[in-house]
Image: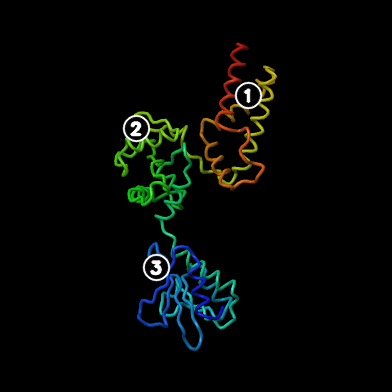
Amino acid sequence: MKTRDQALKYGLSFPDTYQDAPFHDPNWQLIRFKGNKKAFLWTYERDGYINLNVKVDPHKAFFWRDIYKSVIPGYHQNKDHWNTIILDGSVPDKDVKLMIAESYDLVSDSPTKRIYEAVKRIPKGCVATYAQVAEEAGDRKMARAVGNALHKNPDPLSIPCHRVVNAKGELAGEYVFGGAWKQGQRLIEEGVEVKDGKVDLTRYRWDNRNVGNIGSRIKKMESVFDKACEIANTGNITELLAYQPEIKKLQEYYESRQWRYDFEADEEGNLPEDLKRGVLSEDGIFNLLERIREILEEKD
């Protein structure tokens, strides 16, 4: 990468970006992020070369400067947070692009954006507390900021703020889109039981601790389900009683509503093909547990 046009074209390839020339000087061409109008790529000609100013994590600023002589402290900018890349051909294209991408990530990131992304991950049929959302967004201490961000929710259809409750499971009396009644109504429509303005967190709290283990969890539950079905079909009481600890895990999985999140992740293509929804489903688990209960009652 040696030309300004190449650099600008790459900068504009990132989502929600636009070109700007704020100084009424054609030598200075910037690429900004629309969300906050902050520039992450500055381009200008200096000493016969096109220069790029990019934002950098202070911990990585010297990393790039040590590797390449043509990466220097940011010209006319904070030397801790900005680097200048001199496009003299000595810095490989892949690293120029990587530095521009890192600059974009730093400028486009914000606590509010991370909060909204965290809320989007709460599946239907589950709720999360403000502290839980804050933790998912990267900082458990900003629970108050979660409330502020959700009060200004720009897109309630895709950012389901009605799934966020306080530490006691209580709905928000000041729920911005209609108050606690409206929030409760939306939760009920998604299968969450609301009683006296509260949700039972032991039943409906989103389990976001093991998201990376969705595949192995579904495989394990499918294995338990299949074995339990086999025993239930034979009606072997002795074998059924011996398998009760595993059946209890299946029941807890069902009652925690975790299966809802697992299946949504599955349908979005985040799991291998062999884990696509099969016999393991809400009706399947419920019917199996009912059949086991009947068999045990018949024994008594």
Residue 17 placement (x, y as % from top left) = 44, 66
Residue 171 placement (x, y as % from top left) = 35, 37
N-terminal of the pair, mark 3 or mark 2, is 3
Disc 3 marks a residue whose amino acid type is Lys
For marks 1 and 2, give the CA distance.
35 Å
Q: Nearer the viewer, residue 277 or 36?
A: 277
Residue 180 as seen in the image, left or right of residue 8:
left
Q: Where does label 3 land, which residue? A: 38
N-terminal of the pair, mark 1 or mark 2, is 2
Bin the neighbour count of mark 3 within 10 Å (Cα to Cα): few under 14, some 14-19, many 20 and up.
some
Quadrant of the image occupied by residue 29: bottom left
Label 3 with label 1: CB-CB less than 8 Å? no
Camera-nearest label, 1 or 2: 2
* Residue drawn at x 44%, y 52% as measured from the top left: 139
Q: Where does label 1 land, which residue? A: 244
Is residue 40 positioned above or below 239 on the image?
below
For marks 3 and 1, give the CA distance.
59 Å
Callout 1: SS: helix
* Residue drawn at x 37%, y 32% as measured from the top left: 198
